[in-house]
Image: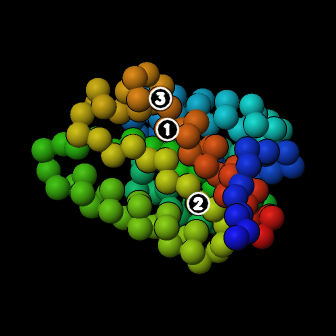
């Protein structure tokens, strides 16, 4: 049996990041984690572009533009949606996750879902670089693996 897998070798990769400004005190930590992972695994800092959008709901629009531009090997979507007292949380989370998945399937570009969807601010903080690691870092590593895998198929 032939096993196909990607490796953490980001040399020569161009990565786009779409980050939500809403809950920026959390999202900025996800962005830092992603940048750390990308550079640590060989992506040149000059080959990383970041677009800040107002909130998580706006992420798919810019992610799609980046993916269709042909300039990027992968797109990282980073944000933090924290449950409130209304159903707004459910609508935003559903649309952002569906949107990012659709873009990846439509374009063939890995579009990575790094949007935290938590019940509390504390849970978001834990996933942005404290107890539960940094999901920005994790998503960046997954993107490198996906690009490497696709290149080797």
* Crowd rating for badge 3 (residues with CA inside 10 Å; few <14, some 14–19, many 20+): some
Question: Looking at the image, which residue sits at the far top?
Answer: 130
User: Which of the two marks, 2 or 3, is nearer to us in this view?
Assistant: 3
Residue 87, which numbered label?
A: none
**Disc 1 vs disc 3: Cβ atoms closer than 8 Å?**
yes
- Res. 93 image quadrant: bottom left
Residue 111, which numbered label?
A: 2
Return the residue at label 1. Answer: 135
- Res. 46 image quadrant: top right
How far apart are labels 1 and 3 at the CA level?
6 Å
- Work out whether mark 2 precedes mark 3 in sequence or the reverse, and give the earlier one: 2
Which residue appears at 70% of the width and 58% of the height? 5
Q: Is residue 122 above or below residue 110?
A: above
Q: In this rendering, does residue 69 appear at all? A: no
Q: Position of residue 55 (x, y in %)?
A: 42, 48
Return the residue at label 3. Answer: 133
Does dot 1 land on a helix, a strand or a loop? helix
């Amino acid at each position: 049996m032939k096993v196909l897998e990607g490796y953490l070798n980001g040399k020569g990769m161009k990565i786009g990041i779409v980050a939500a400004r809403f809950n920026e005190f959390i999202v900025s930590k996800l962005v830092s984690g992603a940048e750390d992972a990308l550079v640590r695994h060989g992506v040149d800092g000059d080959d990383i572009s970041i677009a800040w959008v107002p909130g998580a709901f706006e992420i798919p629009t810019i992610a799609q533009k980046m993916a269709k531009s042909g300039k990027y090997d992968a797109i990282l979507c980073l944000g933090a949606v924290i449950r409130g007292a209304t159903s707004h949380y459910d609508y935003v989370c559903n649309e952002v996750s569906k949107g990012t998945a659709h873009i990846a399937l439509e374009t063939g570009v890995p579009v990575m879902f790094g949007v935290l969807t938590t019940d509390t601010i504390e849970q978001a903080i834990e996933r942005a670089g404290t107890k539960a690691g940094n999901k920005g870092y994790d998503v960046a590593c997954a993107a490198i693996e996906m690009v490497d895998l696709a290149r080797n198929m």
